[in-house]
Amino acid sequence: MMKYTTRGGSGAHHAPFGASVTSQQPKKFFNRGGSLVAMALLASLLVFMTGCVPFWKGSQMQEDLEALEERQAVLEEEVDKREQQLSEMIAEAKAEIEELEQVLEEARRILARDSADLGDDVRQTRREITQLLGTIEELEFRHRRLTQSFETFREDMDRRFEGVEADELLEKAQSFQEEGEYDLARRALERFLAEYDDHQLASEARLDLGDVYYTLRMWENAGAQFTQVSEDSSSRARQAYATFRVGEVFVRLDECDTAQLFFEAVVDDFSGAEEVSDARQWLRRIEAGDCP
């Protein structure tokens, strides 16, 4: 049995097994990683000193202590690995933060630059819009003047042609046409057909109006007048002329395949007409690929 000394007194007493020992133990047994081993060694020492534990049990305890030490070493190694991993993660996070800060700074720089450029673009766009608005106002003013002029012109023509008989009105229109006054001729012919659509001279007026439209490059309008004459006129000569002019209209519309059909009709259906020679010339040009 082991002796111990009580606090505040003297004298030796036998301490029962398992009682607290007041003798001071070296503090190094209780530092990090060594506390468990120190306690086990102390317990083994007490057992051997008391002589109550057989030797084979002491060997088993020694093995247990060694196993405990190995476990402790494994735990410490795992802790070290985790600390290393944590350090690496912290370093990577720091690097990523620095990279993001650089990207952010670059974005701010670009934004500042683009904002300045955008301001210049906005100012330039405003100037262009102002110019366009001025142009639009000028065009609207010119359009109003042209509209007023056209209304005045139409009213004047209506007054000039008011009460004029059909024959005289057609003569006036043809006179304007010969003088190159195509707008006046067009107005007179349109008035004639509006008032005398059933007149015996209506087909002649339509041919004249088609020629005026053609001269004014109003291709579709011209084609409509020529087509009506080619279908409705009782005069073979006017039908031949109208059919030939329809072909020329389709040439101007860059539809040479369709124009070819009308030129062939002139050659086949109106063999004695004056337009046959011109129709054949157009057919040769179309076949040679010389078609506008």
Image (cartoon, rainbow, N blue to C red):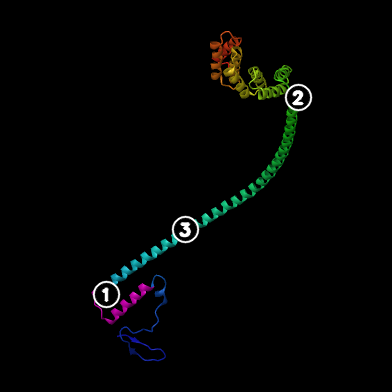
The disc, 1 or 3, on the residue closer to the chain's N-terminal end is 1
Category of crowding for the residue at label 2, using alpha-carbon neighbours closer than 10 angstroms: few (below 14), some (14–19), many (at least 20): few
The image shows residue 130 at horizontal and vertical percentages of 71, 41
Q: Secondary structure at mark 3?
A: helix
Q: CA distance from mark 2 to mark 3?
A: 100 Å
Q: Is residue 67 left or right of residue 112?
A: left
Residue 71 lies in the magenta-colored region: no
Whether residues under marks 2 and 3 lie with C-beta atoms below 8 angstroms apart, the answer is no
* Extreme-top residue of the structure: 272
Residue at x 29% of width, y 72% of height: 62
Q: Which mark is residue 160?
A: 2
Residue at x 36% of width, y 73% of height: 36
Q: What is the magenta segment's predominant secondary structure?
A: helix
Which quadrant would residue 153 be assigned to in this image? top right
Q: Which of the two marks, 1 or 2, is nearer to us in this view?
A: 2
Q: How many marks?
A: 3
Which quadrant would residue 258 be assigned to in this image? top right
Q: Secondary structure at mark 2?
A: helix
Does residue 288 appear in the picture of this structure?
Answer: no
The disc, 1 or 2, on the residue closer to the chain's N-terminal end is 1
Q: What span is colored magenta in the figure?
A: 35-58
Q: Is residue 245 left or right of residue 134?
A: left
Quadrant of the drawing holding the N terminus: bottom left
Does residue 155 appear in the picture of this structure?
Answer: yes
Amino acid on which disc 3 is placed: Met
The image shows residue 132 at horizontal and vertical percentages of 70, 39
Amino acid on which disc 2 is placed: Arg
Write down the residue under mark 3.
89
Amino acid on which disc 1 is placed: Gly
Quadrant of the drawing holding the C terminus: top right
